[in-house]
Amino acid sequence: MSRDNGKPPSGMAVILDREDVNAEMTDPAQCRDCEKSTSTDADLSTLSTSFAQMRSPSRVCSRAALQKPPCHDSSHGGRSNTSEVANNPSTSTDYVPRTSDKEGVAYKACTGLLQERVLNELSLLTKPWKGSIVLSCVPMTLLEGVEKAKEEPVEIDICDYLNGQKTQYSRLNFSPREYPPPEDLKLAFKTSKKNPTTWDDLRTYVVKQSYKNLSPVICSSGSSNGGKKFVCHTLNDANKKNKRGTREDEDFRETHLVNDGERGERENGRSLPRRTSGQDISDGKCGLLFTVKCDEIGYHITLFKCAGNCTHSHHVKPNYSDLTLPLRLLEKNEFKELKNVHDTQAGEGLCKAYLYAKTGQLVRRGKIAYLFGSQATGDADFASDIDKLLAFFDEEDDIVHAVFWDVASQGNDGCRLVSRCKRSEDKDPIVTDLTADPSMKKVVEMVHEDRKERKIGSNQNLFLSVMWAEKENLRYFKMYPETVFVDVTSHSNNKKYHLLTFSCKSGANKQVLFLKAWIPNQRRFSFRWVFKYGIESLGLHHYFKYTELFMKDGDPQQHNEIKIFMGDYLTNAFDGACGWHLVRQGCLRDCPGKNAAGEENADKWDQFLTHVKNWLYSWMRPGYCETEDEYKISKELLFRYISSQSALQAAGGQQQLLDKVKQWVQNKVIVSENHFLFYLRKHKRAFHTYCSNGHEGTNFGMKNHTIPMKATGTMTKNAKALTMQASLKAAEMNADAYRNVTKPNKKWSKLPTAPHVTPFAEGLVHAIMDRQDLYSVRRVGEREFEVKCSICVEPFIADHSVSEDKCPIPRFYRIRRVVVDDDGVCRCSCCYFEQVGIPCPHMAKVFDTVQSQWDGFLHTDVSVRWWSRYNYSAYQFPGHGNLTQLFHDLRHNDVKGPKLHLDLLTDDCMPIEDPSTEMSAVRRLKNYDVNDISKELGGTVDGCIVTTSAAQSEMERNMLESNGGAPDAAIFSESLEDFQFRADGSLPPGVSLRSALIPQFNEVCRFCEQFPQL
């Protein structure tokens, strides 16, 4: 027989091909015997029978047998003749038999021999072995008494004394000072959970030391002659029998090779128990045993008449990390530390990791859950999750909350909608009946349907919603109410409730969640109570009136209720829509994918979609479209770009792809233009915000925090986790605010504002000052200046994601005008101060030009929201003296701009020149040639040639080909005015009547809800 290319045949164990294994474990002569035994077909049956009659693998063989394993042979009565095999020179150490025909039996025989040797070797691991338990004891003879017991104990291994190994000693006495015996010896072994006795402490000490020394013991029962026996924890009579009855096979989960965790459940969705439990069913038990007794001298381990046994048997010796640490062995300080970790709501997993890092031993999560669960803490009433949640809110003094119920009333009045609120200043909760409110009529109907569907009786209360806030986070909202973000996230608890969250931005540019609410679904009635009663009941509506931007996503149900809320309270706020949801998510949902135009055009098509998305984003960002005419020009040019030949080439000649993009822009983006256009909100303190990504990040952070909110967690547990997250966030921000106040010096800035504003604000001021040299200034009036930028794009609004070389996105040339009023307050046409609260580079250039020695803006020229002192001291309850009221008054009477300390009427710092000629928006285009605008839109942009298509109407042709005559601004205004409906009343191609009427429809619905009597 020969080998094929030195490779073992299919199905053969690879271990047989290793020379070291063959040399050490397998005698090649025996393998030759196996080969010889297969010489005839008649021998095959004999060999198989002989192999089947091999001795049991569980039998322990001798060392000699293990060194030379037997090989069965039919011609030698089941044993091979090693002398004959040794004389056979045809066998080598790297020989591997093949498994074909007759040879297969020989291969199976050799495999069986290896299996037998492995099993025999494993059986040696369970041979008796001596234990070791080191305890602090005093060895005493039979004649020694109390005086000997009072000696200082020494650490000894008690297993060296058990079973008569040192017959001169009769007992191992524990220190009577540390473990004093009771006066009544009948109470020597009494236990108590609430007030641990001396025996409890001694028993814990003995068991804990046994675990440390890898000989775990357990106090099993009393001895026949008094005392308590300690036996091996691994193998004893107590854990050999299963007290419960054997479960049927169908009561367990079916095991699957793939997705085992998600399969094998009952039809009603409840998970079946896994087949993972086990028990010891062997005949033997471990022999380790010793007895602790107590007399007048003290507690001791008896050695009388060779008592005890130091030998473990019938089980494998464990490693330290293999042992599961019983939680009862924890010291008081360790238990307290573990409870503190568990109280952070980080979960049992973190507690398990903490104990493993501290002790090196594993503790099951189930044990930790039971240790701090309701059964272990004595909570016998087992209240519902909602009851525990509301009890938690009532007990916390730093939480204000409001609850919405459908309460079962007395008599025949039926159920009633009730709002219950608890604020910090109220001693008792405030209860309001909302059943008779006309605006809640729809809510009443929905609740009745819900009761009927869920089969909830009229004698039961139905929980609807709850909203809560931590006082410290509410403080940040009161300080920074200018921008508010709202969103709903699902998978926030095991009750399928959705989490509605509100956040704001602090003076350190941190996103702060200040209000949270659990609502049953995202239907309109769920939002109605939150926005109409919940916020007002908590007293927050007084601060919402200072909000200037209310940012949300595209949920229509949420949007309609917010519109009503804004009409009542947010009278000064801009109703914003998240540009990220509109553009990026909308493009993924409604536009053809990257490979829709074919593999050869995938990159061009992807580049085309990127240009379209950046074009849409340009309407939301500063520096692009700052007037209505600029927006209309950009919008018309975008549709020209989508209809261009280069776009058709990027689409691989598939016009339907471009039609889908155009329909998406018209029907899904432009219909919401009143909610995202920058020029509509450039006078608002919105901080250039056009999307809610920061708030989306907080939703992500809640679920991926060190103390996470889990979809499988109860509402009570997740509420505690969210509260702990908020507390940690507030503590971190307060610490930063305190550091900024106590260490105001900023080594990286020498500006006058540096010691007084937050690091983030100082960074903005520093960037503004660095850019002033890029501008030139002219005085065009007694109190008016013109500021021009010397580069293509103003740096403080530059968008580096867009190429400036003939970019298809239109850019406009502008002259900024800085005006100084009678009080010396400066205002700039860029509206940067109105948006951010920090002077713009145009103002900085004017200040630097008219004042010979000007070092920079003062902190009084910056909005108070950026002051370090305001960030630390404002709205502190109890307040810092009068600071709370003073900061409140200053915030609502904030500076309107930096003050120029110079009388321009008497100081001839600059000559007055003629102002520049006003230019229409089309004449101010930077990257489009007006004379060629009808021929092409741009040039080469990243390899994509951008050209226009022919004009679709006479009006558009006249607009695009105009080089003189009527003013260009008037032409564009006439052409692009009211884009949704053209001059003749028709709709643009691809725009449905339903999409065009959405804004009007929403307005009519809001009006009808406000005046239901109509």
Image: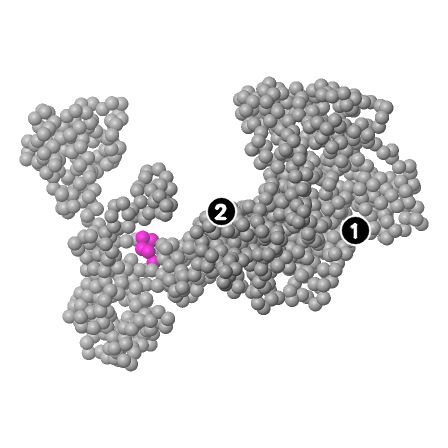
Q: Which of labels 2 and 1 is toward the front?
A: 2
Q: Residues within 10 Å of mark 2 (few under 14, many from 20)?
A: some
Residue 698 seen in this snapshot: no
Indicate which disc residue 327 carries. none
Q: Amino acid at mark 2?
A: His
The image quarter in which residue 625 lies: top right
Q: What are the residue bounds of the magenta stretch?
A: 320-325
In the rendered image, residue 266, in percent from the top left (x then y), is placed at 34, 44
- The residue indicated by pointer 1 is 896
The image quarter in which residue 877 lies: bottom right
In the rendered image, residue 2, in percent from the top left (x then y), is placed at 20, 23
* SS label for mark 1: loop
Residue pictured at 33% horizontal, 47% vertical: 272
Q: Amino acid at mark 1?
A: Lys
- The residue indicated by pointer 2 is 491
In the image, residue 463 above or below residue 97? below
Cα gap from disc 2 to disc 1, whole angstroms? 44 Å
